[in-house]
Image: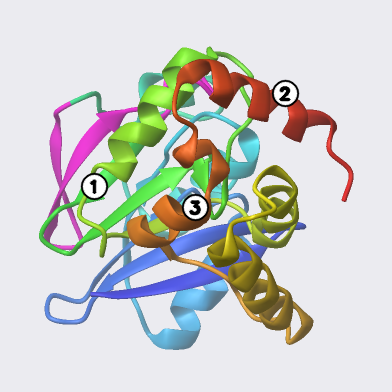
C-alpha cells in the first residue's frame, strides 16, 4: 500500500491510498476535486473510492466533482449527507474494503457528532480526520471533552507503531503549545525542534505514530478528563 498526501487549501491534507497489486486508489477527505484528480492522473492511478471522516466541507467539498469524473462511490458517516450524497453510510464496527484492504470503522464523536475513523489493522494505520493531530487534537465543535478524551485514549491504546493520518498540517503550532504545556518534557522539546526544521524546508510532518503521541501530545498524556478539558481551553486561546 502506498499513501500519498495531497496538500490543498491552506493546511489540509487529502490522503490517497493506492494498491498497485490491484490497481485501485481510494481518497480520504477530499476538500476539493481538481488537485486530487491531477495527482492521480499524474501517477496513472485509477480512483475507485471516496472516504469521508466527517461532514465539514473542507473534508467533503470535492466529493461530487471526483465522483462525476470517476464514478467512485462515496463511503461516509450519515452526517456527510449534509454536504453531498453518500453511497455507503458506515458506522461503528462496520468493515469496509478499501483499495483491496480491510478497514474497520470507529465512531469517534466530539469534533462533530458523527465523526468516524478508518482503522487498517493489517496495515498498521488509521485515518482520524480532525480528531487527533500530531501533538494535538480537534476542537470540540459538536461534542464534549469526555468524548474527545475517550477517543484519544482509544487511539493511544493501539500498537505504538501504528501510523496516524490526520487532516491538517497543524504540527508546528501544536508543538509550540505542547512545549508550553509540558516545559520539562525533553521529548516534546526535541520534537518541536525537528518539526520546526521540517517546516522550514517545506516538508510534511505527517503521519505521526502512536508512540510519538504518547511521548509528546499533552492531550493524550493528560491523566484525566478534567486536565484534558483544561488543556483544550488553554489551547483555544493560546498564541505562540
Q: Magenta residues, as a range?
A: 93-116
From the viewer's perspective, is the residue at label 1 or at label 2 nearer? 2
Camera-side residue: 64 or 135? 135
The CA span between labels 1 and 3 is: 12 Å
Which image quarter is the N terminus in? Answer: bottom left
Residue 238 higher or lower than 134, as above or below: above
**Position of residue 155 measured from the top left corner of the image (x, y, whole percent):** 32, 41
Where residue 45 sits, quadrant-wise, is bottom left
Where residue 233 sits, quadrant-wise, is top right
Helix, strand or loop under label 2: helix
Q: Dot 1 surroundings within 10 Å: few (below 14), some, or many (20 or more)?
A: many
Dot 2 or dot 3: first in sequence order is 3
Check the image and name the residue furthest to the right: 239
Disc assigned to residue 233: 2
Q: Is residue 231 left or right of residue 28?
A: right
Q: Residue at x 55, y 26 (%)?
A: 228
Q: Which residue is mark 3?
A: 166
Question: Contact (CB < 8 A) between labels 1 and 2?
Answer: no
The CA span between labels 1 and 2 is: 29 Å
Residue 107 part of the magenta segment: yes
Residue 110 part of the magenta segment: yes
Helix, strand or loop under label 1: strand
Q: Dot 2 surroundings within 10 Å: few (below 14), some, or many (20 or more)?
A: some
Q: Which residue is mark 1?
A: 119
The CA span between labels 2 and 3 is: 21 Å
Question: Contact (CB < 8 A) between labels 2 and 3?
Answer: no
Amino acid at each position: 500500500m502506498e499513501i500519498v498526501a495531497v496538500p490543498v487549501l491552506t493546511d489540509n491534507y487529502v490522503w490517497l491510498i493506492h494498491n498497485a497489486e490491484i490497481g485501485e486508489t481510494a481518497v480520504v477527505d477530499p476538500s476539493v476535486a481538481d488537485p486530487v484528480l491531477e495527482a492521480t492522473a499524474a501517477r496513472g492511478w485509477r480512483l475507485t473510492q471516496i472516504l469521508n471522516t466527517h461532514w465539514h466541507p473542507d473534508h467533503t467539498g470535492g466529493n461530487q466533482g471526483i465522483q462525476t469524473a470517476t464514478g467512485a462511490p462515496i463511503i461516509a458517516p450519515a452526517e456527510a449527507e449534509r454536504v453531498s450524497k453518500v453511497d455507503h453510510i458506515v458506522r461503528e464496527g462496520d468493515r469496509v474494503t478499501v483499495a483491496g484492504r480491510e478497514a474497520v470503522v470507529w465512531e469517534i464523536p466530539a469534533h462533530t457528532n458523527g465523526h468516524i475513523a478508518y482503522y487498517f489493522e493489517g496495515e498498521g494505520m488509521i485515518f482520524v480526520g480532525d480528531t487527533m493531530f500530531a501533538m494535538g487534537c480537534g476542537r470540540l465543535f459538536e461534542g464534549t471533552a469526555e468524548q474527545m478524551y475517550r477517543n484519544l485514549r482509544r487511539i493511544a491504546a493501539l500498537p505504538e507503531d501504528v501510523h496516524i493520518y490526520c487532516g491538517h498540517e497543524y504540527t508546528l503550532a501544536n508543538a509550540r503549545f505542547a512545549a508550553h504545556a509540558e516545559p520539562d518534557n525533553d521529548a516534546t522539546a526535541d520534537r518541536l525542534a525537528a518539526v520546526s526544521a521540517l517546516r522550514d524546508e517545506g516538508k510534511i510532518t505527517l503521519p505521526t505514530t502512536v508512540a510519538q503521541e504518547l511521548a509528546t501530545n499533552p492531550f493524550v498524556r493528560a491523566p484525566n478528563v478534567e486536565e484534558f478539558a483544561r488543556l483544550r481551553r488553554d489551547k483555544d486561546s493560546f498564541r505562540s
